[in-house]
Amino acid sequence: MKTLTFNNGDKMHAIGLGTWKATGSDVKNAVKEALYAGYRHIDTAAVYGNEEVIGEALAEVFAEGNILREDVFITSKLWNDAHQEGQVIPAVEDSLKKLKLDYLDLYLVHWPVAFRPGVGFPEKPSDYLSPEEVPVIETWKQMEAAKKNGHAKHIGVSNFSKEKLKDLISKAEIKPEMNQVEMHPYLQQDDLVDFCKSESILMTAYSPLGSGDRSAAMKGEDEPNLMEIDEIKEIARKKGASTAQVLINWHNQRGIATIPKSASKEHIKDNFQAASVQLDKDDLKTIKSLNKNYRFITGKFFECPEKGYENIYND
């Protein structure tokens, strides 16, 4: 298994288990099956509503004694309603309590958008707090405190554009160590990847398989299916691999981690075994030609011009 290495030498598996949209016994079983299959990287977030169940799964596995807490890299994320002064530390402590952990390996600012306390998803402009009311650096200074006091070994961001990263880096004491964004052959983000590499910021790709199980309300009209891309299917056939394995391994070949989500034991194992696929230069060239700058997660659900959120990704 390829790993990504942080500046202090800590390592993270390049293939982790994503848990967005997974709840209840499904996610509990998925986490346990993933750990038994060899995964050592689990990704969750406060807003997913599954931290408690994941915490139960982790506690049960750790109690068995074969897999230790220090063996597993665990990520969670700060939701948008806890960005103000004094809110980040209580939020991370709540995540730790639910996950039954003493520390997180990585804690991320989930979105560069701020809501009023208690707002899960905004319905009107007054549900937002503008960038002037809650500057990102105000939130980030609290993230830095979470690292300094041991709540999280590493801190980073999610869904941040190059422009937003540049601005944050110019003001931060501790540079973001990770940027987790949507990425796949139809959204290759080369400019952002190059920038993050130049700043020694690691990257994790979410929705690597296209997040086909999103609700209909979140889907675009006639959106593409990554699993049906002819070129990817041909590479998979040539390699004796599944289409999903090719999609996952492509990120690893670029030095980027990825967190495919599955609740199926078979798919969990299949995704993990993507690490053994070997893509050659021709395969990579073929995949490079597929970029369409197409987003499945458009971010438009958080756009609110009245509050200064006109273009989440600065596209």
Image: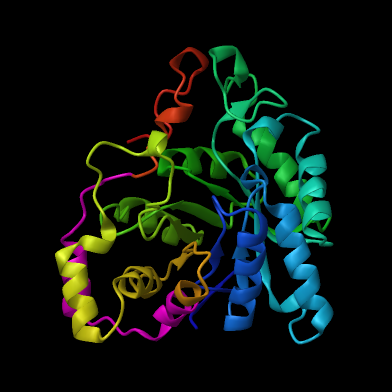
- Rendered position, 312 above or below 116: below
Q: Foreground residue, 249 or 131?
A: 249
Which residue is painted at 78% across and 34% down in the image? 87
Q: What is the magenta range?
A: 269-295
Q: Is residue 57 left or right of residue 307?
A: right
- Where residue 34 sits, quadrant-wise, is bottom right
Which residue is painted at 40% across and 37% down in the image? 218
- Where residue 114 sits, quadrant-wise, is top right
Residue 71 visible at all: yes
**Magenta stretch containing residue 22, yes or no?**
no
Which residue is painted at 31% across and 74% down in the image? 246
- Rendered position, 308 above or below 189: above
Count the numbered circles shown: 0
Q: Residue 147: horizontal and vertical position, in percent?
A: 75, 54
Q: Residue 113: horizontal and vertical position, in percent?
A: 55, 31
For the C terminus, give its image quadrant.
Answer: top left
Q: Foreground residue, 182 or 230?
A: 230
Q: Is residue 145 left or right of residue 162?
A: right
Q: Foreground residue, 190 or 39?
A: 39
**Magenta stretch containing residue 289, yes or no?**
yes
- Rendered position, 291 above or below 13: above
Residue 313 visible at all: no
- Rendered position, 275 above or below 201: below
Q: Foreground residue, 117 or 201?
A: 117
Q: Residue 266: horizontal and vertical position, in percent?
A: 47, 76
Q: Residue 282: horizontal and vertical position, in percent?
A: 16, 78
Q: Is residue 110 left or right of residue 103?
A: left
